[in-house]
Amino acid sequence: MTSPRFPVLCHREIPSISSSWPPSIWTLDCHSITPIPQASRAFPGRLAELRAGFGMKLSWGRWSSYRGKLRKNFFVKVSASGDPVTSETDSVPNEAVGAGKGDPFNHFRGVISSLPPVVFVMKRNPGANFVIGFCIATAIFFIVGRVYAARNAMYDRPGSVADLVRRGQLRSDRRGISTPLKYEDPFNNPLVKVGKKNSTVEMCGKVYRLAPVTLTKEEETIHKRRRSRAYQWKRPTMFLKEGDTIPPDVDPDTVRWIPANHPFATTASDIDEDLAQTNVYQKHGVPFRIQAEHEALQRKLEALQREERLDKLVIDRGNAKDFERQFKFQAKSQDVEQGPPFKPSKSDFSPSPAESNSSSEEIQKS
Amino acid sequence: MLSLQLLPASPSSSSIRFSAPFNLISRTLKPHSSRTRFRTAAVPVQSVLQWNRKPQLAGETPRVVVITSGKGGVGKTTTTANVGLSLARLGFSVVAVDADVGLRNLDLLLGLENRVNYTLVEVLNGDCRLDQALVRDKRWSNFELLCISKPRSKLPIGFGGKALVWLVDSLKSRQEGCPEFILIDCPAGIDAGFITAITPANEAVLVTTPDITSLRDADRVTGLLECDGIRDIKMIVNRVRTDMIKGEDMMSVLDVQEMLGLALLGVIPEDSEVIRSTNRGYPLVLNKPPTLAGLAFEQAAWRLVEQDSMKAVMVEEEPKKRGFFSFFGG
């Protein structure tokens, strides 16, 4: 059975081999992977036969191409059964009939199971090799290109993360972790390009149309006048707590009332204005409050030294060592615990700063 | 780094005038997209790029710039961090002051939260010197941060504004040189913190978003700034979405400008990387590859240096012309 769309030639007489006839033969044999022996090249009449199930039978096809001096003929043979070499010419018509008569599904399964032994035979012609290689490379390139284009088309879903990658906002390999960098040249940004007519700008791969700003000085002045009429305001210079009385020489419009429970502002200050100004202007030396606290402490110490109480503040080194040993040697401290309870006096816990520092460091090291 | 500049507008642009001034912002806050479109089409766009040069500093140093908005959450702190670091990258010495007394966040955006030991309140009290309270950024050593107070401490508001004036004076006379820029991150609202923050400033950057709530507050704040004597006010329109503008769901930048009547310092597109950069404590302008918003912040910083304003804005996205090899992903 033949299909009208695929006219089948069960047999076709092939012209005999001549100098102008096929320099190469490309045979597709569905039966086996066995390469067609050299003899097949001597029989160019075996061109191509494609036999398909479901009542379709494709047989001989021939592709010929002539290009310049190279003349090539490709012959493809696809057959479902039979010996590709010996009994091919005989068996093909019978099978073609059988295929039409038998179960098309089984036959199609047979066809599928035998797919796709491809035998590639060509005449040993270096020019032809080059052309065929070129064709294969072109085909591979085309397939890769199509796959790449399809993958790009997949990213066209609007609003996805891939969109950000395409816009250059995200790097696909490190999504969301853009590299912290130091710009090599902040004055030359290749991601911004202005169109030739200066009416478009391309930023981060997207082209934007530009429109001129049309605000004129007159319009700005009109707006300023409008605002000066609408908003009349004097900056507050006096901040008073709610409930305070306004001083007599102060414009009430310049008073700002600060509630007592204002979250971040207070009218009270423990430092006067002149001193605050001096503190801001200070460039070197110890800050005022630090120095004041230091001096206060110094005075306190001096006062204490003058009293007898200061003698008690002097460290008893023996007691201090006992205290350190408690932390250093647990065994010994346990012994101490077993013994009479160690109750250091208050003065024992107030070593000199140097001593306390060293002991704390030792504790940290241990 | 480059900036978009426009050549002097053609005479035809001057023929377009306001039909009526705004009387009340609440009545006039409507986008006039159709008129804007018409005007856009009438005036040719000519922009010139500035390639490969450092921007020329205009004005007297230190330039004390307050970054304010009125409404909260529009991107004041993000703008301060990114513009500040952009200026530092351009080679200028910058001191950023977080004047948001109650709710400071600038240190978080810059990733310096663990290095803030002293604030201006401690300086005032004499607990430390000013140079000890300035936190120098290790990435760009010409960028310093000063927080005005710790989150739970109260600022003696009686001389809060004066304290910032003293601060500016003190920075002017410091040994390593006067900083070129002092950026003050203003708190939201027009409360005592706002008054404190604007006190030393001689120019202002108003950050707004293209929505009417933000615009009303921005207009009010602009009025207060003008009453206070700050005349150099420019605006940054933040979180702009060209796709929504195209669909008439969002006011265009030109609509915003028509309502407020302020010069444009920058237009920042909505960018998902803002949240990521905040999470990381790394401002957008330091990201590689640069993001769209980061580029816009860079350009805004460029204009700030030169006291320039935008002459052309991006209005909508155009389909990119595909080349012959685009079939293969080219």
Image: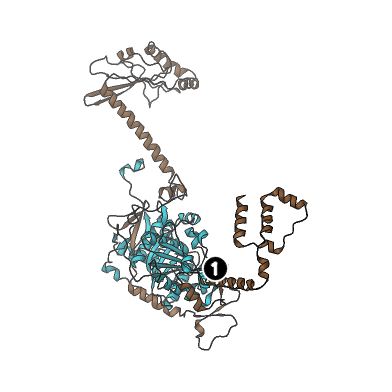
Chain colours: A brown, B cyan
> Is any atom of residue A17 visible in this view?
yes
Task: Spot the residue most to the bottom.
Answer: A248
| Residue A265 picture quarter | bottom right
Q: How many marks?
A: 1
| Residue B176 picture quarter | bottom left
Chain for disc number 1 = B
State whether residue A152 is above or below residue B100. Answer: above
Position in image of residue A43 (x %, y %):
31, 13
Check disc 1 and give the amino acid type. Answer: Gly
Q: Which residue position is annotated with label 1?
A: B102
On-image quarter of the N terminus of chain B:
bottom left
Residue at left offset 36%, top offset 42%:
B329
Position in image of residue A298 (x %, y %):
58, 71
Position in image of residue A217 (x %, y %):
33, 73
Camera-nearest residue between A191 and B10: A191
Task: Spot the residue most to the top.
Answer: A86
**Left or right relative to A276: residue B60:** left
